[in-house]
Image (tube, grey):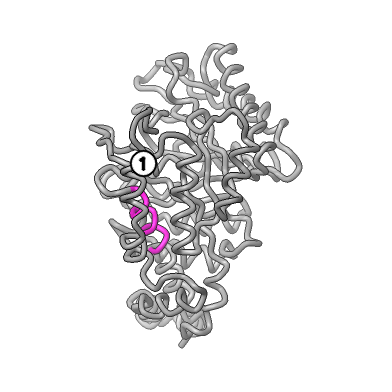
Amino acid sequence: MTSFSDISAQLADQAIELPSWAFGNSGTRFRVFGQTGVPRDPFEKVADAAQVHELTGLAPKVALHIPWDRVDDFGVLRRHAQDLGVSLGTVNSNTFQDDEYMLGSLTHPDASVRRRAVDHHIDCIDVMDEIGSRDLKIWLADGTNYPGQDDLRARQDRLAESLAAIYARIGEDQRLVLEYKFFEPAFYHTDVPDWGTSYAQVSALGEKAFVCLDTGHHAPGTNIEFIVMQLLRLGKLGSFDFNSRFYADDDLIVGAADPFQLFRILVEVIRGGGYGADSGVAFMLDQCHNIEKKIPGQIRSVLNVQEMTARALLVDRDALSTAQQAGDVLGANEVLMDAFYTDVRPALAEWRESRGLPASPMKAYAASGYQQKIEAERVGGAQAGWGA
């Protein structure tokens, strides 16, 4: 049986990127409830993210969203992050807010609109150059609402052409990561609805293009861990957007709806070599905190990922393989379930203390006074929100 001491060193390899937008006012399609103390600019977003890393040791990078996080000098923002003990990570593009993109962006029938969308991504790569970012992540709202609205095949051809133009600008040490989502805001068809479409598009681009898997972007009942396995097997899993869903793309705290699913995903990540600094797979959160406080929401999220990672690392691989080879169906399942049901929280608390971190980051944050401080200081001005 694998013990916690056996996996302690591996846990130190975990790094989970935080989304800058999770610290601003963001929420559901129904309503965004404003909160006191939320950041007013990207510098304050980074400062809040740094609090999560300081208390957990799990979140050394902050992802940016352009133009939401545009500043006059990205070099200044980069140094600000470094001074706070974190760095700037993935750059996320945005082609889903402007009126011009109503009928699509990279797939739009009008070549001038497609050119504008491509140019936006080139601007994002310029930002990456300034901050030392590796990944450009693309999520597209492109699609149609009605049969016959546009030519489905032509849209795939336009997408391939647009992505090729962006990919040509990607630097030697940079990557393009294409996300997929099976519906919304387009309801008849989405241009990148599934992992197969994303895989086909990035495979045509080259070795610096990968698939991003958002755990909330699948139809109910989808076996997400199978997709994880397949993309790792094919060498094309670039990154995760971790969140949790009950119905659709809910963007709730990861592990909240189905912690067993998160465990199963991480079992396949580890099995497929997708865990650790050298794997090339980026772990990132993509969540909204609409009714809960932003910073505790992010702390709870990274702790959930860490807990399920520890359980996945505890799977007795030798015993599992032996049972599988023997056709011992229930025995193999029991090996997996033994790891899942192991309560690793006390061991993780000790693990954190041994590294100079608080045993309970949630309690440490509540006692720190940081929430009260930002609520008192961040008054006036425009608070950052979804779309800003």
- Secondary structure beneath disc 1? helix
For the point 36% across and 70% down, the residue is: 360
Does residue 123 show up magenta in the picture?
A: no
Image coordinates for residue 384, horizontal then vertical, percent: 39, 33
Extreme residue toward the bottom, this view: 1
Image quadrant in which you'd find residue 122: top right
Please identify the dominant SS of the magenta region.
helix
Residue 180 visible from this viewpoint: yes
Read off the residue under disc 1.
377
Q: Nearer the viewer, residue 203 or 78?
A: 78
Image coordinates for residue 61, horizontal then vertical, percent: 55, 51
For the point 44% across and 59% down, the residue is: 225
Q: Nearer the viewer, residue 281 or 64?
A: 64
**Horizontal side of residue 251 vs 350, given as left or right:** left
**Horizontal side of residue 243 vs 228, given as left or right:** left
Image quadrant in which you'd find residue 203: top right
Extreme residue toward the right, this view: 172
Type of amino acid at the residue the image marks with label 1: Glu
**Horizontal side of residue 333 vs 231, given as left or right:** left
Q: Is residue 218 above or below residue 266?
A: above
Image coordinates for residue 188, horizontal then vertical, percent: 35, 27
Assess disc 1: are there few (<14), some (14-19) or many (≥20) residues with their C-alpha within 10 Å of its C-alpha: few
Q: Which residues are magenta?
A: 294-303
